[in-house]
Image: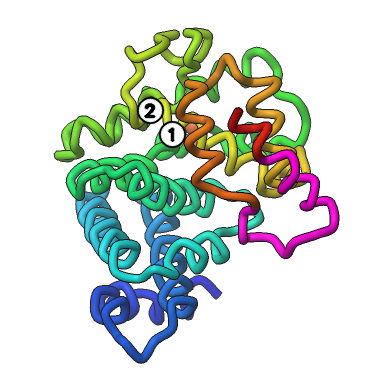
C-alpha cells in the first residue's frame, strides 16, 4: 500500500505550495494533504535518517505548513482534526510538528523561530531509529536496562543530525525534549530556563500527544483527562506558565475527537486548569 500511495504523495509534496494556495480547495482537503505528505516524509526519514535530501524536504514541508497556518483561518481546526489517534513514531512526530506550529503561531513566534521549531519537532525522535524495535513496541513495562537504552535516543538523534546543517534551535529539541523543568529528566538532567524554550514546549506537546493517542501499552486518554493529569501529577516535568498557555491554546476541546457527554466536564473544569 505504501508504494502506491507514496506516488500520489510524492506528487502532492512537489505541488504542496500550489495546493495550499488553491482557492478552490477546502481547508479540510489542504489539511489532509499537508498531514499525509508529512506522514510519508516521516516514514522516509525513519528508513534513511542520514539523508540530506529528506532533511531538505522537511524544511520545505515546514515552510509550506507555516504558509498554510498564516493564510487560512481554518487551518487550526483542519489540521488538529486530521492528526492521528494511533501512535506510531512517524505520525507522533508529525502530530508534534503540527501542534507545535499552531501553538508557536499562538505564541507569536516569528517565521524563523517557527521554522526551527517545526523542523525540530518533526525530527525530535529520529534517534529512536537506533533503538531495537522490540523495545520500542514492547507492550508491557520496560526493564531498567531497556529504559536505559530508550534514554539514549536524544543523543543518538543529535549524532545523526550534527553535521547536517540543522539549526541549533531544532537540535536543542532533539536533545532536550525529555528534560524535566525540575531537572529530573534525561539525558543531561538540566532544569528551568537552562532547557531551551523549544525544549520546554516540546516536553509538553510530546507528553500530550503520547497520552491522547492509542499506544501498544495504553489506550488514548481524553484530552481533558490528559491535561488534568499533566497538571496535577506531572507538574514537575513542565514549566507551569507554558502548560497553562498550551491549555488555553487548545481551548475547551481538542477537535480530533467528536464531543462526548463527559466533555462537558472539560468545559466546566477548563477554567480551573488555567487558574
Ligand atoms: Fe523522545
Ligand atoms: Fe516523542
Vertically, is 196 above or below 139? above
Question: Label 1's element?
Answer: helix
Find residue 13 and report its image quarter: bottom left
Secondary structure at numbered mark 2: helix
Identify the residue at image location x=20%, y=30%. Answer: 168
Residue placed most toward the observer, 207 or 26:
26
> Pointers 1 and 2 in contact (CB under 8 A)?
yes
**Where 183 falls versus 68 (above or below)?**
above
Q: Residue at x 48, y 73 (%)?
A: 32
Q: Nearer the viewer, residue 224 or 7?
A: 224
Name the residue located 43 percent from the left edge and 27 percent from the top edge.
177
Magenta region: which residues? 253-270
Q: Position of residue 69 (x, y in %)?
A: 34, 62
* Image side of residue 169 versus residue 225, left or right: left
Q: Label 2 belongs to which residue?
A: 199
| Quadrant in the picture for residue 157 | top left
Residue 48, given in percent of the width and then of the height, sits at 35, 50
Which residue bears the numbered disc 1? 202
Residue 46 picture location, percent across and down: 42, 49
Q: Which residue lies furthest to the right in this view?
A: 261
Amino acid at each position: 500500500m505504501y508504494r502506491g500511495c507514496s506516488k500520489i504523495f510524492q506528487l502532492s509534496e512537489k505541488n504542496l505550495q500550489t495546493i495550499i494556495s488553491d482557492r478552490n480547495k477546502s481547508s479540510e482537503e489542504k489539511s489532509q494533504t499537508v498531514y499525509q505528505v508529512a506522514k510519508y516524509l516521516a516514514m522516509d526519514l525513519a528508513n534513511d535518517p542520514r539523508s540530506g535530501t529528506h532533511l531538505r524536504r522537511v524544511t520545505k514541508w515546514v515552510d509550506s505548513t507555516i504558509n498554510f497556518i498564516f493564510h487560512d483561518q481554518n487551518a487550526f481546526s483542519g489540521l488538529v482534526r486530521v492528526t492521528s489517534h494511533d501512535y506510531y513514531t512517524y505520525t507522533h512526530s508529525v502530530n508534534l510538528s503540527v501542534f507545535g506550529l499552531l501553538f508557536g503561531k499562538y505564541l507569536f513566534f516569528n517565521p524563523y523561530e517557527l521554522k526551527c521549531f517545526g523542523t525540530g519537532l518533526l525530527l525530535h525522535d529520529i534517534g529512536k531509529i537506533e533503538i531495537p524495535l522490540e523495545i520500542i513496541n514492547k507492550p508491557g513495562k520496560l526493564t531498567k536496562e531497556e529504559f536505559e537504552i530508550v534514554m539514549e535516543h536524544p543523543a543518538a538523534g543529535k549524532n545523526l543530525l550534527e553535521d547536517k546543517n540543522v539549526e541549533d534551535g531544532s537540535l536543542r529539541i532533539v536533545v532536550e525534549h525529555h528534560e524535566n523543568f525540575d531537572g529530573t529528566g534525561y539525558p543531561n538532567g538540566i532544569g528551568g530556563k537552562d532547557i531551551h524554550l523549544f525544549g520546554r514546549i516540546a516536553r509538553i506537546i510530546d507528553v500530550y500527544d503520547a497520552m491522547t493517542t492509542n499506544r501498544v501499552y495504553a489506550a488514548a486518554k481524553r484530552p481533558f483527562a490528559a491535561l488534568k493529569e499533566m497538571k496535577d501529577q506531572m507538574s514537575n516535568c513542565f514549566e507551569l506558565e507554558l502548560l497553562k498557555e498550551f491549555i488555553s491554546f487548545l481551548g475547551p476541546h481538542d477537535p480530533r475527537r467528536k464531543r462526548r457527554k463527559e466533555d462537558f466536564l472539560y468545559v466546566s473544569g477548563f477554567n480551573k486548569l488555567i487558574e
